[in-house]
Image: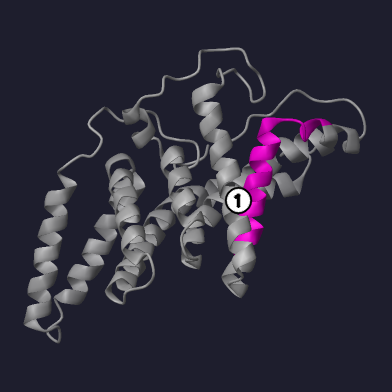
Amino acid sequence: MPPKPTTNMPGTPIKRLMELAKTLQFAWFVGHAITLFSSLLCLTSFRPLLYRLAYFGVLESFGIITYQHYFIKSGPAAGTSSGSAARTITPASLLQNGDVLYFLMAIVWTFTPQFTLSLVPYMMFSVFHVLIYVKSILLPEVFNLNASNSKMVLFIDNTVRSYNERCMYWVGSAELGILACLLLRVIFWYPRSLVLFASYSTFIKFRFENSKYMKSAFAQWRVRLDGIMSHPSIPIPLKKAYNKSKSLLIRLSEFRLAKSPVPPQSAHASKAE
């Protein structure tokens, strides 16, 4: 759920920015900005401080959107308190809410040994949420810029429309890549690797049950791996092991961890509009 524009605020751009900074949505935006830039720097330097800072931003942004979802009455615009009552909290609703799952997984990443690749999905989310906030609120409310009078706003809008849907599929594929890396870490006995693999496997299972993008990522990986394993140079024992593993995963996919009907898609873990 991208942030909604607020009413036009009087005063200079600095004053309007100061007023905007008092809103919860601005804190949400700051969290994503911290995640984005810290992740970019961490992926090039692998510094532990940047890694922890990136996850601080993740916990801030996902924590705020989860708090808004469950504890603040929904209104017609961001920052308002009128509207329908806050949503009922049940174990089923929590387990099916992508924002809650990403928040809980971020806690796990924060308190386990650094695994820099884990930042990639969060960084991809943050790219689009930063762009959406800049386009929808920051530029219009602070600088009075919109698609009709600014090429920058129009460019951001076109970029989001062109790549947002694709990004959701890329996130699903990246998460499967992370799971494969975690499996390798288990094989080579990395510290706490089994805990991370078990936690992330459970996370992926919930995402598979509730996300069409994760289902699509699994289908794409299956097609690619089937093609690789069909090559004559692949040893027969390896092909048999692959087929057994694939059959096991198919059976596991038929078992649902969350039994209740799927609620509306979450704000971060679904396509932004």
Q: Examine the rendered structure and indicate whether residue 127 appears above or below residue 76.
A: below
Residue 1 left/right relative to 233: right
Quarter holding residue 24: top right
Relative side of 175 to 60, left or right? left
Considering the numbered disc 1 on the image, is that residue within a helix, a strand or a loop? Answer: helix
Q: On screen, 98 above or below 57? A: above
At 88% from the left edge and 25% from the top edge, which residue is drawn?
Answer: 10
* Magenta stretch encompasses residue 23: yes
Query: Which residue occupies 30% across, 49% down?
Result: 202
Residue 90: within the magenta?
A: no
Task: Look at 33% across and 59% down and name the residue there.
Answer: 195
Residue 157 visible in the displayed image: no
Q: Residues within 10 Å of mark 1 (few under 14, many from 20)?
A: some
Residue 153 lies, in percent from the top left, at 71, 44
Residue for badge 1: 56
Q: Return the residue nearer the eye: 1 or 199.
A: 199
Residue 53 vertical placement versus 158 (above, below): below
Classified by dominant secondary structure, the portion drawn in magenta counts as helix
Residue 6 place in picture, x, y as percent = 72, 26
Amino acid at dot 1: Phe
Residue 134 on image: x %, y %: 70, 43
- 260 with respect to 125 (left or right): left
Q: Residue at x 34, y 62 (%)?
A: 179
Report whether residue 167 is seen: yes
- Position in image of residue 51 (x %, y %): 58, 62
Going by the picture, which residue comes out furthest to the bottom? 233
- Residues in magenta, as a range: 19-39
Q: How many marks?
A: 1
